[in-house]
Image (cartoon, helix red, strand yellow):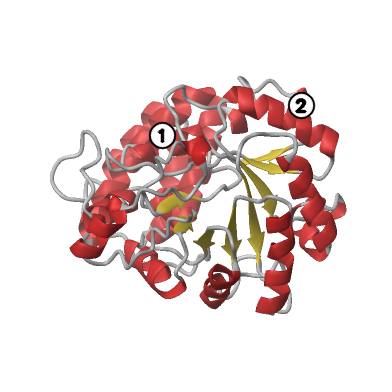
Amino acid sequence: MVLNLASNPTSASSSSALLNRKEALLNASLGGRLNFPLCLAPMVGLSHVALRLLLREYLPSDAFTIWPTEMLNSRRLPNEDMAKTPAALRDPSEEGLVPQILGNEESMITQSLELLSAWGAEGIDINMGCPVEKALRHNYGVALMGDPAYAAEVVRMTVRNTTLPVSVKLRAVESGDSQKLLAFTRKLEEAGVSWLTLHPRTAEQRRRGSANWTQIRELKQGSGVPVIGNGDIQTVQDVHEMLKTTGCDMVMAGRALAARPWMLWQLGEDLGFAKPSGKLGLAPRSRVEEGREYGLVLRRHLQLCLQFFGEALGLRKFHFYVRTTSVWLPFGHALYSVVTKAKTPTEIFAAIDLFFSREVEMSESTELRQ
């Protein structure tokens, strides 16, 4: 019934068994193609088409995973042009897209689902983890976790208005009580959710403190649907550790995967997948190799931002990417400074080349929480 992609993926023999599984984590709408245990998290300002395409360049050529969008507000989406809305832009080549929606009104959700289905969505993710004040004020996002019956009804109204699989991304319950979490998620399962993603921090924590992976394990053990684990993934070793210790079906990573797209390549090597198309040699592993690769990633990210968003918006998105991901460099603040002082794309490319003309090391971890 469920593919547990976590089948001890730390050895060649176990990864072979993993790849021979015929079940898929998601249902038949993904055609049984899902075979890779790492995916990108939906992140406002980051999980757009440019970043997704950049990461896809590091995905093993025989791997298939799911891909998010930025959070899409179902109150606004029906009145927007999907071909022009930056958060909804997609490339025709993209597969496995599971856009994330925020909302609680059936009429708006229904209209959004119709748009997203025509747009090419292969699943729908409901955000029950957003802790921002606006979401709390409108009783969506993490606010839904305070009302289990209403949260289940949001899932039910979504499921009855689409043929696509529906997932929910949620946070830990306030008390950290696993029984309370399981009681909540059972209602979501009864409402028809296809899989769950848990970021085990409370709304109050935001990104402070550590993610409690024990809750991921407890949710997996008590759940009747697949579970994706999320939180404090900074390296490929963290991916292996989460899979091993929690038994989750898949791992989701946010800012660290944005900063280290080659984590997909590293994991593919560990599990016996083919190289990413066009990549030579082995995945970067040392701090120097990763620092060098990050410089190449910056150039490619800027190219893609300019291609999809134009110069003004593309540069803003690129600056935000550098500010978010450069914290893994010992002197990331210096990189951000030189990039933002440059006024044109040509000047930015030159600044990147100059900065990385010397040896730059990338830190294994940062205090930034995922």
Relative to 291, 343 lies left or right: right
Front one among 323 and 168: 168
The x and y percentages for residue 289 are 21, 54
Front one among 249 and 264: 249
The x and y percentages for residue 213 are 52, 74
> Disc 2 to disc 1, how far (Cα)?
25 Å
Helix, strand, or loop for circle 1? helix
Query: Residue 207, located in which quarter of the rendered image?
Result: bottom right
Q: Residue at x 45, y 38 (%)?
A: 52
Q: Residue at x 23, y 57 (%)?
A: 16
Name the front one of labels 2 and 1.
2
The x and y percentages for residue 199 are 58, 64
Residue where numbered disc 1 is placed = 53
Q: Residue at x 50, y 46 (%)?
A: 26
Residue where numbered disc 2 is placed = 78
Dot 1 crowding, Cα within 10 Å, few <14, some 14–19, many 20+: some
Relative to 59, 323 lies left or right: right
Relative to 240, 202 lies left or right: right
Query: Residue 7, located in which quarter of the rendered image?
Result: bottom left
Vertical comparison of 141 with 248: above or below: above
Helix, strand, or loop for circle 2? helix
Specify the label residue 206 is tagged with: none
- Extreme residue in the left direction: 281
Lower sequence index among marks 2 and 1: 1
